[in-house]
Amino acid sequence: MDFDFILGQEKLIENLKKVLEKKELVHAYLLEGQKGLGKKRVAYLFAKGICCRGQGQRPCNKCISCRKMEGGNHPEIMWIQGEGSIKIDQIRQLQKNLQLMPYEGDQKVCIICHADEMTVQAQNALLKTLEEPPKHAVVILLTARPDSLLPTIVSRCQRIKMSPITREEIEKCLINKKGLEENEARVIGSLSKGIIGEALRLLEDEDFKRQRKETIRITRDLIDKNTIEVLENIHFFIEERPHINEILDMLIIWYRDLLIYKDTNVWTYIINIDQGEDILYQSKKLSFDSIKEMFLIINKTRENFMTNVNFQLSLENMLLELKEKTK
């Protein structure tokens, strides 16, 4: 595995390659970005390149150092990972290891996953290492929440930010590398919010497929069923409460598709392209203004959940308001 496997982070990867080529390393890096963007993979490859003993491009994937990294038994590359908080004892052990000279090569690397889960005591202990780092040591911190780290930690690291990628890049990856049909790739790419890890999770998630099917059924119920029958769908939302944001996203994308088709009669920009029959049916039953208002109702409900509103009452109101717009 090399940097070519990192999707949509070309500028970042180009910069890391230059650092490895010129051996212009600093003692600490803060690799930040949302969960699922590939921070751990980037850190793995960067550490592999730092310790690589080959000539030319790093990592070379051929030298003994690269082979040990691939085998998971490199003596100079340490990982702190796992669930739960990172305690001061783990950082103290790290410090002892970093003080020792490398047995192989001339660099030691430590990768701290979920660095924001370090306790305050652990962060203060790490700060001592960052202030007076051993010349042979590189520390790589990974986090989705840089604001949870002490400012003094952040200020002593070179920050590397990973950003969400385009829907088109994710779709292309799903089609070319996972063999998906274009229609399915378009849906997953849109719901992944630019995060390749989320796209791969949705691809394998049977619950996601069931939730999407039920969500689309509810949009049909809003048109075809009476108010009492529509309100019975509240049970679905309650059962899927841990995934409510994803389900509301599905609804927003659905009515976004209806708006576009109602206005243009063109399929080019439709995301739920595999549900053409329902899009045709609903777009004939609903006016453009009604669809627009339904879109806004769902978006308002999603915003309400950020202010600790009553969960069930808010969803019941949403269903009632949506039903009203179908009349």
Image (cartoon, rainbow, N blue to C red):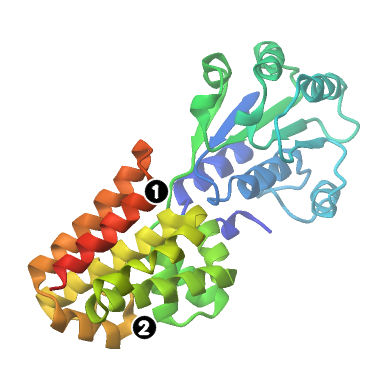
Outermost residue on the right side: it is: 103
Where does the image place residue 109, in percent across and percent down from the top left? 75, 33
Where does the image place residue 28, in percent across and percent down from the top left? 63, 25
From where the camera sits, is residue 123 visible?
yes
Residue at image position (67%, 13%) is: 124
From where the camera sits, is residue 269 visible?
no
Residue at image position (56%, 64%) is: 200
Q: CA distance from mark 1 to mark 2?
A: 31 Å
Judge by depth and name the residue closer to the eye, 183 or 135.
183
Q: Residues within 10 Å of mark 1 (few under 14, many from 20)?
A: some
Split into 4 quadrants, where in the image is the N terminus? Answer: bottom right
Q: Is residue 98 left or right of residue 42?
A: right
Q: Are marks 1 and 2 in contact (CB under 8 Å)?
A: no
Split into 4 quadrants, where in the image is the C terminus? Answer: bottom left
Give the secondary structure at mark 2.
helix
The label number, if any, that marks residue 311 in the structure image:
1
Residue at image position (65%, 42%) is: 43
Which of disc 2 and disc 1 is earlier in sequence?
A: 2
Would you name the residue on which mark 2 appears? Answer: 274
Q: Is residue 238 left or right of residue 307?
A: right
Residue at image position (51%, 35%) is: 160
Give the secondary structure at mark 1.
helix
Judge by depth and name the residue closer to the eye, 49 or 71.
71
**Type of amino acid under label 2:** Asp
**Type of amino acid under label 1:** Phe
Q: Report which quarter residue 186 is drawn in.
A: bottom left
Q: Report which quarter residue 256 is drawn in.
A: bottom left
Where does the image place residue 82, in percent across and percent down from the top left? 74, 41
The label number, if any, that marks residue 286 in the structure image:
none
Q: Report which quarter residue 141 is drawn in.
A: top right
Judge by depth and name the residue closer to the eye, 94 or 250.
250
